[in-house]
Image (cartoon, helix red, strand yellow):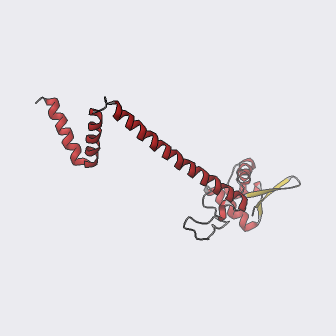
Amino acid sequence: MTTHEDAQKNLQLLLSTISPEFTELTASLNDVMSHADNPMLVTALLYKLSQERHQTNALLEKMYAKYDELSFQWKTSGMSPTNLPTPNNNQYPIPAHSISLLPQNDQKIMKMVEEKGSVDASLIQTQLGYKNPNAASQRLNMLVKAGHLGKIQSGKKVVFVKTN
């Protein structure tokens, strides 16, 4: 025996001790490859592949249809992401005041709005230590765009309040 054949047997022995399933799979694959020149075998494999692909596509179509159905129900029921039921079908809505997904400064802003009822950029600037009111105003406007706050113009002053 040559050293190449020894190395190959050592590799097969190592693979069989690490993963018997892999050894079984490669043995089946080697058996198929030894008959790869047979057109009937290739035809049978291609037919099986097309059947599995057809089944996979049918499964994906069902999943897309279910997703569309759920999406439509969600949009027409008027449910918001804050009061969706949990996956185990308990009807415990997530509290509307849950702000744990926001960055820390945004959580502080939301807490101030809940406590005071309304805030403006100058108050946020002083409370959070922003250097100018533009930074505070940008942060507040981001919360408005995300739907967490509402914006009310009161003369030259803009006031931010919590949305329902």
At x 71%, y 48%, the residue is 135
In the rendered image, the vertical position of residue 57 relative to residue 87, given as above or below: above
From the top left corner, tell me how far across and down residue 119 is, in percent: 76, 60
In the foreground, 64 or 105: 64
Instruction: Reply above or below: 40 against 102.
Output: above
Residue at 28% in and 40% down: 26
- Please give the name of the residue rendered at 56% of the width and 64% of the height, measured from the top-left corner: 87
Describe residue 153's horizontal placement relative to residue 124 as left or right: right
Check the picture and name the quadrant holding the C terminus. bottom right
Please provide percent x and percent y for residue 125. 72, 54
User: At 66% from the left edge and 65% from the top edge, which residue is drawn?
Assistant: 83
Q: Nearer the viewer, residue 124 or 66?
A: 66
Q: Is residue 15 visible?
A: yes
Residue farthest along the front direction in this orientation: 40
Residue 70 sits in quarter: bottom right
**Is 5 displayed left or right of 55 in the figure?**
left
Is residue 125 visible in the rendered image? The answer is no
Picture coordinates of residue 62, whole percent (x, y): 57, 51
Q: Where in the figure is residue 133, as x and y percent of width and height?
A: 75, 50
Q: Describe residue 54's horizontal placement relative to residue 134 as left or right.
A: left
Q: Residue furthest left?
A: 1
Q: Nearer the viewer, residue 83 or 52?
A: 52
127 or 162, which lies in front?
162
Farthest right residue in view: 155
